[in-house]
Image (cartoon, coloured by chain):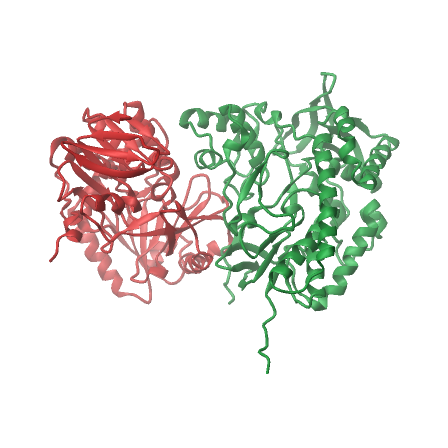
């Protein structure tokens, strides 16, 4: 009698486009993966699903991406019986070949043969003086409010920053009937022209972007390009009351509003890759440290695979391709038969999206210089309430010019977000202050738990 | 030759940094060599207890010397290391009533060394500190102990030493140390050499690598503390709190910093890897720690931890450091292997080692810490 082989233990973290397509590939290969997701429902951030009792149609929720959203959700619905899906489950640590999870107070440690990290992205934020006032949101946060709960973040909303999400969320707000007062883009219009050759790699997405801008203009929304954000005016009691900025022409202007949504495109959620001890390399294009991976998504650690925007920001379409590709690579590494031709074709797709992503980076550049121009009294790290002046003073006193050293002395990046929201700007400020290249500042070491973990963990077990 | 001085110190933790400061006070020239950055391992990652209570009675003179330095640290260092003399409470649980007697004995002996402790029943404790759980039977309160910020302390001592003229080389890994004639020649991985007639080894978990080069290997074991910290909550817990128990798993402690975060420690220790310069918190140790924290203070179960960390500590079999002169080589001194309990006494160790080196003697008892206890055959 043939010895029965245990099915390989595959764990996927994240139920967005990358995680869903990875799960689908596993199921098609006869493997039942465990799919862990923090969210209450599948879809991830971009294809976030509304609560069960909400009834807005796909076209209303997802606009030009309605077809993709629906296809992904339907794929997921079809997979549910063939996968071990654990929603509302936080992966808070990875160690010793196990994934450590928390679901409310329930603790688990799950061993794996292959681990696919499809952890997605959060907003890349550049601090602005006053960004700690109530009414300041990230672009992603403002989109969640709309998609999930059908609410606007304010009565009169300013969108400020740069990147495709700036225009997407602003137009979604317009569509939903919210009052969008202005869109303030730090990127000059000329950058978009220069980026055209790369952006033409995916013409349909480029066209979506053009349509969004036209839609905003038709709705009468003031769109300013090449601005410099100066201050979010407000106070601790009543929150945001206006946004002050310098126009591309150099004049200062105030816009009255009660909410502002900010962001400069996205940054990958790489903490779990770090805890899994994956090697990182500096990516000059995005001025970030990213986990290393081969063209199929293999990390430097055997059995750990990286896909989607959690590895590098290449967009939702690319995430579907890279999620499936990483899963096929994992299955092949586990000795299961996979379609090599399909892998080649998926690699090509990911390459095309990578070209488009380079175009986006050119069209909406990260305004790194703004960090060094932050006034001393501007709060840099909101979790710990550390100002730009605090950090500069501590650097002068201690000579610290490495990210973790500066954190140890100043608390920048030491709070509950662990530097997700201030870390990139803090690194820019340190580099400017110490007059060293940003890569020499290093990167904040990831520390468990990647999100706050209740002290009551395991209490009922 | 990259540098000559009166004293070379290898190891830039709290011991080496404070020794550098006090040696400058004696007028000796000092070169301090650190593999990485000042105070990044045991000195920077420990719990931050500035606690005399619970130390061996023979260590209290050293601890008393240290507390005097902590109290004047702001003036001495020109920096705030967040030292707070906010008290320390050690408690025992109902299932170990015999420990109340141990607490009484300890308090009587400690009083003779100048440390006043007050024994308090569980109910009185809960009246004053309502966070204690029902399992707490009694406590011993030390109003003059407290805590400080380990991330800031050793670097502040090193900066103060540098201001007084100590030469500090960070990112300088030492690969060889020898005595040639009257001088020690210490060689870094990049080939730089340093020379001095006196060598002080304050290299923590790496101490054995150097003592072995002088025929004095010691059975040091590297481990790492299991540390966690909560999100900030309103400042309400003044004293540092710890559990007295023979079981390592039950030995947890916590303190709240003025900023509001509560630092949690203990229960178990994890592995650490001196060669790789890394220490890891084992997830199961975090889970165990939180379970025992809930027993000590159930209401903390309503908070979240936002970060865990560890560092490389050197443990001796008897939990006592190697501190004092070498038995094989004149001019060679050791102060390492503080076994997870070096933070409070650190500045006292630095001052005492400076005194031994500069004056040849000290009143502080160091007999229990002699290196010969490991190197001499019985």
The location of residue B269, given as percent across then percent down, is: 37, 55
Label the red chain with its letter.
Answer: B
Write the residue at 79% across / 52% down.
A69
The location of residue A353, given as percent across then percent down, is: 73, 42
The location of residue A175, given as percent across then percent down, is: 84, 41
Q: Is residue A426 left or right of residue B186?
A: right
Write the residue at 83% across / 50% down.
A66
Which of A154 and B332 lies nearest the eye of the viewer? B332
Residue at the right extreme? A218
Q: Is residue A204 left or right of residue B231?
A: right
Query: Is residue A348 visible in this depiction of the protein?
Result: yes
Query: Is residue B74 visible in this depiction of the protein?
Result: no
Q: Is residue B108 left or right of residue A193?
A: left
Residue at the front extreme? A341
Q: In terms of image quadrants, where is residue A156?
A: top right
Image quadrant holding the N terminus of chain A, namely bottom right
Write the residue at 42% across / 27% down.
A399
Q: Is residue A318 left or right of residue B344?
A: right
The location of residue B94, given as percent across then percent down, is: 33, 65
Residue at the bottom extreme? A1
Q: How many marks?
A: 0
- In the image, residue B74 above or below residue B109: above
Q: In terms of image quadrants, where is residue B99?
A: bottom left
Label the green chain with its letter.
Answer: A
Which of A412 and A236 lies nearest the eye of the viewer? A412
Write the residue at 15% across / 42% down.
B326
């Amino acid at each position: 009698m043939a010895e029965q082989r245990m099915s390989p233990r595959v764990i996927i973290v994240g139920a967005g486009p990358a995680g869903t397509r990875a799960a689908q590939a596993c199921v098609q290969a006869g493997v039942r993966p465990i799919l862990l997701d923090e969210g209450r429902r599948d879809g991830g951030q971009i294809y976030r699903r509304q609560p069960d009792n909400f009834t807005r149609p796909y076209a209303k929720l997802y606009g030009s991406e309605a077809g993709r959203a629906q296809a992904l959700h339907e794929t997921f619905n079809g997979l549910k019986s063939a996968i071990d899906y654990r929603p509302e489950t936080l992966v808070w640590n990875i160690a010793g070949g196990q994934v450590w999870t928390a679901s409310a107070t329930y603790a688990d440690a799950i061993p794996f043969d292959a681990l696919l990290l499809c952890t997605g992205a959060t907003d890349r934020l550049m601090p602005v003086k006053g960004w700690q006032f109530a009414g300041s949101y990230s672009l992603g946060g403002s989109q969640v409010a709309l998609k999930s709960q059908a609410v606007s973040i304010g009565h009169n909303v300013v969108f400020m920053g740069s990147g495709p999400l700036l225009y997407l969320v602003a137009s979604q707000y317009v569509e939903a009937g919210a009052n969008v007062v202005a869109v303030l883009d730090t990127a000059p219009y000329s950058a978009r022209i220069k980026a055209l050759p790369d952006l033409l790699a995916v013409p349909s997405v480029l066209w979506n972007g053009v349509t969004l801008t036209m839609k905003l203009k038709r709705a009468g929304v003031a769109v300013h390009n090449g601005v410099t954000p100066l201050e979010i005016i407000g106070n601790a009691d009543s929150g945001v009351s206006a946004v002050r900025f310098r126009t591309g022409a150099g004049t200062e202007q105030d816009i009255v509003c009660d909410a502002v949504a900010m962001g400069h495109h996205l940054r990958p959620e790489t903490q779990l890759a770090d805890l899994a001890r994956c090697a990182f390399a500096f990516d000059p294009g995005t001025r970030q440290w990213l986990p290393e991976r081969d063209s199929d998504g293999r990390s430097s650690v055997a059995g750990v695979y990286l896909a989607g925007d959690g590895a590098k920001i290449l967009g939702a379409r690319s995430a579907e391709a890279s999620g499936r590709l990483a899963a096929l690579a994992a299955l092949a590494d586990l000795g299961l038969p996979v379609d090599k031709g399909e892998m080649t074709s998926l690699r090509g797709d990911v390459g095309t999206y990578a070209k488009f992503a380079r175009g986006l980076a050119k069209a909406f550049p990260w305004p790194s210089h703004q960090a060094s121009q932050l006034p001393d009294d501007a709060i840099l790290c909101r979790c710990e309430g550390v100002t730009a002046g605090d950090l500069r003073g501590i650097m002068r006193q201690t000579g610290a010019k490495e990210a973790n050293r500066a954190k140890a002395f100043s608390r920048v990046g030491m709070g509950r977000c662990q530097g997700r929201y201030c870390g990139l700007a803090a690194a820019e400020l340190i580099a400017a202050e110490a007059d060293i290249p940003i890569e020499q500042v290093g990167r904040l070491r990831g520390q468990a738990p990647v999100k706050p973990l209740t002290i009551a963990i395991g209490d009922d077990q | 030759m990259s540098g000559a001085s009166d004293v070379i110190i290898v190891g830039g933790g709290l011991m080496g940094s404070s020794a550098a400061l006090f040696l400058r006070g004696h007028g000796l020239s000092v070169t301090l060599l650190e593999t990485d950055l000042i105070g990044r391992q045991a000195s920077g990652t420990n719990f931050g207890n500035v606690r005399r209570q619970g130390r061996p009675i023979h260590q209290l003179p050293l601890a008393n010397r240290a507390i005097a330095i902590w109290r004047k640290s702001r003036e001495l260092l020109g920096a705030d290391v967040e030292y707070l003399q906010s008290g320390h409470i050690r408690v025992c649980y109902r299932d170990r009533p015999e420990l109340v007697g141990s607490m009484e004995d300890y308090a009587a002996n400690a009083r003779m060394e100048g440390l006043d402790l007050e024994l308090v029943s569980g109910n009185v404790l809960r009246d004053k500190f309502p966070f204690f759980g029902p399992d707490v039977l009694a406590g011993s309160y030390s109003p003059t102990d407290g805590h400080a910020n380990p991330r800031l302390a050793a670097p502040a001592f090193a900066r103060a030493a540098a201001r007084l003229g100590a030469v500090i080389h960070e990112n300088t890994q030492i690969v060889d140390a020898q005595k040639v004639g009257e001088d020690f020649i210490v060689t870094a991985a990049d080939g730089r050499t340093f020379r001095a007639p006196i060598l002080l080894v304050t290299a923590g978990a790496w101490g054995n690598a150097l003592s072995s080069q002088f025929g004095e290997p010691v059975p040091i074991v590297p481990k790492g503390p299991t540390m966690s910290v909560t999100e900030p909550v309103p400042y309400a817990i003044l004293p540092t709190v710890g559990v007295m128990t023979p079981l390592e798993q039950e030995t947890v402690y916590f303190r709240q910093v003025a900023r509001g975060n509560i630092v949690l420690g203990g229960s178990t220790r994890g592995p650490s890897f001196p060669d790789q310069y890394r220490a890891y918190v084992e997830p199961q140790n975090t889970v165990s720690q939180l379970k025992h924290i809930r027993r000590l203070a159930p209401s903390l179960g309503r908070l979240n931890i936002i970060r865990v960390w560890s560092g490389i500590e050197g443990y001796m079999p008897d939990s006592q450091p190697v501190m004092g002169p070498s038995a094989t080589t004149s001019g060679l001194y050791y102060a390492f292997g503080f076994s997870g309990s070096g933070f409070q006494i650190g500045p006292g160790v630095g001052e005492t080692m400076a005194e031994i080196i500069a004056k040849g003697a000290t009143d502080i008892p160091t007999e229990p810490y002699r290196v010969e206890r490991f190197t001499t055959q019985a």
